[in-house]
Image (tube, rainbow, N blue to C red):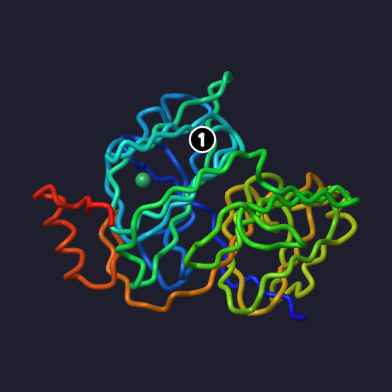
């Protein structure tokens, strides 16, 4: 077994998206190879309705899958084919856009005005880019949760992990998508097989993942106790952590514990032609999609 080192670490960047939603983007729109098969990751989290309620009105998608995970508030979605749904706290929607959908995604806050969700984009291989659109809506209660004796909690949203299988299936990128909490001071090791690219996104607390200077990802005793801690030396809130080769990820939680998403997928290794929410292999396929949007033939008849 070999521990994956951290190869890149960065804070998510404040961005405005949709009709004026303030969010933080961990990656997207620059180097599609870096996280292959994943293209983009957004953290939309707000305490005030004015920051998010304008939402993401009608827009197209083609050639990708979008994965939405809601932690607080709700997201109402609807598409031009008449599909409607409502994601509440803890729910997940895996949408395979395939040949194309036109949809809107409208967040609203909980009773305290809070909204928190994540959206990940996964690429589709060329032979599935024009597949029929498909939704997999998963209620939070149907997501298997692993509770360890030491207080560690792992929600298996997709993939097989520690003997549990997540409820989303038939996904091209064979992804693993876990929501993990590790209590203060605990060091944990999570298997992630070598064929996959992997990243973590920290959204509560802080901790240390293995890197070249700290290959086992351990914390000093004083760091665990929260004394003389420079929290900036740890991976904290809104940090994207990209891993190199290996078959395990390890982290030691700081004095407040750490909660993060651990996401991994098999790289597709194909050319990427990217135009906003449409991601194809060639510029010609993008031109075709834009033409179809203009002349009203973007939505393909069911086959
Ligand atoms: Fe969308």
List x then y, in percent, for residue 294: 11, 50
| Of the pair 138 and 189, the residue shown nearer to us | 138
Q: Quadrant of residue 244?
A: bottom right
State the residue lying farthest toward the left. 295
List x then y, in percent, for residue 95: 43, 50
| Of the pair 145 and 20, the residue shown nearer to us | 145
Question: Crowding near pointer 1: few (<14 within 10 Å), some, many (20+)?
Answer: many
The secondary structure type at the circle numbered 1 is strand
Q: Residue at x 66, y 51 (%)?
A: 179
Q: Quadrant of the C terminus?
A: bottom left
Residue under label 1, please give it. 87
List x then y, in percent, for residue 52: 42, 31
Q: Residue at x 77, y 81 (%)?
A: 1
Task: Indicate if the residue with disc 1 has its beta carbon within 8 Å of ligand 1.
Answer: no
In the image, is 134 to the left or to the right of 9? left
State the residue lying farthest toward the front. 303
In the image, is 218 to the left or to the right of 194? right
In the image, is 232 to the left or to the right of 67? right
Q: Quadrant of residue 207?
A: bottom right
List x then y, in percent, for residue 142: 66, 43
| Of the pair 30 and 73, the residue shown nearer to us | 73
Q: Residue at x 20, y 64 (%)?
A: 286
Q: Residue at x 59, y 39 (%)?
A: 139
Placement of 165 over or under 137, stated as above or below = below
């Amino acid at each position: 077994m070999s521990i994956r080192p951290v190869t890149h670490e960065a804070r998510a960047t404040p961005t405005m998206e949709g009709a004026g939603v303030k969010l933080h983007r961990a990656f997207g729109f620059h180097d599609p190879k870096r996280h292959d098969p994943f293209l983009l990751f957004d953290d939309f989290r707000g305490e005030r309705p004015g920051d998010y309620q304008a939402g993401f009105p009608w827009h197209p998608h083609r050639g990708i899958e979008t994965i939405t995970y809601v932690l607080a508030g709700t997201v109402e979605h609807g598409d031009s084919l008449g599909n409607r749904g409502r994601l509440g706290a803890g729910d997940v929607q895996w949408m395979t856009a395939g040949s194309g959908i036109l949809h809107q995604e409208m967040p609203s806050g909980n009773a305290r005005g809070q909204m928190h969700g994540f959206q990940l984009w996964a690429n589709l291989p060329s032979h599935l880019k024009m597949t029929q659109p498909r939704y997999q809506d998963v209620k939070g209660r149907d997501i298997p949760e692993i509770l360890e004796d030491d207080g560690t909690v792992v929600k298996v949203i997709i993939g097989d992990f520690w003997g549990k299988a997540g409820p989303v299936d038939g996904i091209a990128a064979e992804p693993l998508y876990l929501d993990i909490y590790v209590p203060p001071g605990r060091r944990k090791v999570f298997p992630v097989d070598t064929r996959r690219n992997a990243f973590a996104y920290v959204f509560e607390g802080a901790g240390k993942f293995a890197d070249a200077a700290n290959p086992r990802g351990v914390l000093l005793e004083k760091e665990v106790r929260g004394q003389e801690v420079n929290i900036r030396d740890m991976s904290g809130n809104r940090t994207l952590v990209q891993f190199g080769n290996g078959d395990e990820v390890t982290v030691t939680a700081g004095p407040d514990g750490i909660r993060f998403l651990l996401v991994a997928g098999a790289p597709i290794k194909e050319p990427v032609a990217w135009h906003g929410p449409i991601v194809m292999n060639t510029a010609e396929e993008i031109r075709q999609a834009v033409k179809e949007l203009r002349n009203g033939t973007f939505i393909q008849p069911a086959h």
